[in-house]
Image: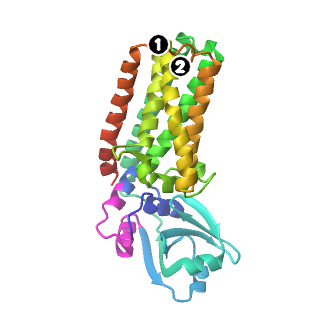
């Protein structure tokens, strides 16, 4: 069984209805000594789930198996959730998909794993793990609420709500931050259902294709997703804390626009596929330009204040810090 970015063990426990916590169960799966059906069977037994592996030569007999069960395909294991004469519903990397029985059966290798949930099936020490998970979630909620309160206070106290352009700039910065966050997740191999849905708008495989090219990074040093996240994050913070620097933010936005033209050209003519998230980020940069222009923040832009050096330094600090942290986060995830 190959290691994948999305945890099929968690998905299968969900399908079986076995109580578990994400952190513990993910850790157990990732440290599983035998990445095979045998190892999967042993791990399921820890959770009170008996399982049997079969090699079915007559694929049509798969219709007799009680769902859910794991099927081995050319692209890895999937979870079969329903098997009807005219439609098969299965889960692959967190996505619920449908296909015809003929297409599905031709893609399988014939190897399946059938799990049977026991009456007391659950994660070992589930109560303690669940309590720790709730506490961790509570901390995140409190932290998020505190950040939102401070951000809202800065937005109101600095009068950003008094002008339509600054309201729109704030919203577009938030949108850009969300889009580039999903791009960073994808570049780290972290599965996100939201990102998956967004990427499927223009080209289902487009985001992964674009992010796998050399052009997805600047000289192989930093990923463009990291550059975008740093740009929108610092721009938003600067706007909230130092609203008087909005003219400098407008200048920085102007400097980003040539990149958007190159990015669209590269996707259309070089790799001939579209990354919906990337295109959305480029659109966000142009939306910012029109907001700055409409609000009169682009005039005058010359002479540029020497403070732009400090702003540029802030972008670099956040970008290089993010670039240094991500490899460690990838290592921990593995």
Q: Is residue 121 visible?
A: no
Q: Quadrant of residue 8?
A: bottom left
Check if residue 35 falls in the magenta segment: yes
Q: How many labels does the image show?
A: 2
Residue of label 2: 152
Q: Where is residue 30 in the image (x, y as percent from the top left)?
A: 34, 59
Mark 1, Cα crowd under 10 Å, few <14 / some 14-19 / many 20+, is: few
Mark carried by residue 19: none
- Residue that protrudes farthest toward the right in the picture: 86
Q: Mark 1 points at which residue?
A: 303
Q: Residue at horizontal 30%, vertical 51%? A: 331
Residue at 71% x, 75% y is 86
Cα distance between the residues tagged 2 and 1: 32 Å
- Residue 246 x, y percent position in the rendering: 51, 17
Instruction: Give the secondary structure at mark 2.
Output: helix
Q: Position of residue 90 (x, y in %)?
A: 58, 67
- Residue 222 at x, y = what percent? 36, 42
Q: In this view, does 84 lie above or below 144?
A: below
Question: Over which residues does the magenta segment extend?
Answer: 27-48
Image-based side of 33 in relation to 305, left or right: left
């Amino acid at each position: 069984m190959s290691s994948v970015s999305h945890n099929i063990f968690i998905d299968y426990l969900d399908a079986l209805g076995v109580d578990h916590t994400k952190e513990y169960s993910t850790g157990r799966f990732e440290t599983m000594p035998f990445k095979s059906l045998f190892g999967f069977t042993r791990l399921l037994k820890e959770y009170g789930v008996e399982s049997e592996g079969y090699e079915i030569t007559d694929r049509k007999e798969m219709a007799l198996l009680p769902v859910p069960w794991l099927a081995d395909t050319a692209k890895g294991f999937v979870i079969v959730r329903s098997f009807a004469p005219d439609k098969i519903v299965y889960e692959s990397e967190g996505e619920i998909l449908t296909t015809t029985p003929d297409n599905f059966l031709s893609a399988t290798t014939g190897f399946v794993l059938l799990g049977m949930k026991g009456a007391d099936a659950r994660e070992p020490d589930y109560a303690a793990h669940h309590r720790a998970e709730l506490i961790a979630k509570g901390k995140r909620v409190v932290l998020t609420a505190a950040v939102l309160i401070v951000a809202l206070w800065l937005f109101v106290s600095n009068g950003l709500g008094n002008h339509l352009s600054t309201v729109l700039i704030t919203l577009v910065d938030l949108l850009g931050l969300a889009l580039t966050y999903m791009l960073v997740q994808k570049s780290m191999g972290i599965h996100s259902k939201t990102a998956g849905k967004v990427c499927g708008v223009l080209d289902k495989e487009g985001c992964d294709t674009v992010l796998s090219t050399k052009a997805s990074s600047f000289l192989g040093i930093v990923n463009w997703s990291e550059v975008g996240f740093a740009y929108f994050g610092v721009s938003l913070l600067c706007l909230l804390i130092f609203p008087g620097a909005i003219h400098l933010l407008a200048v920085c936005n102007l400097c980003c626009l040539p990149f958007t033209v190159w990015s669209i050209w590269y996707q259309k003519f070089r790799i001939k596929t579209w990354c919906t998230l990337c295109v959305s980020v480029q659109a966000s940069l142009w939306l910012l330009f029109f907001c700055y222009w409409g609000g009169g923040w682009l005039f005058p832009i010359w002479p540029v204040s020497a403070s732009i050096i400090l702003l540029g330094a802030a972008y670099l600090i956040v970008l290089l810090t993010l670039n240094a942290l991500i490899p460690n986060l990838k290592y921990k995830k593995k």
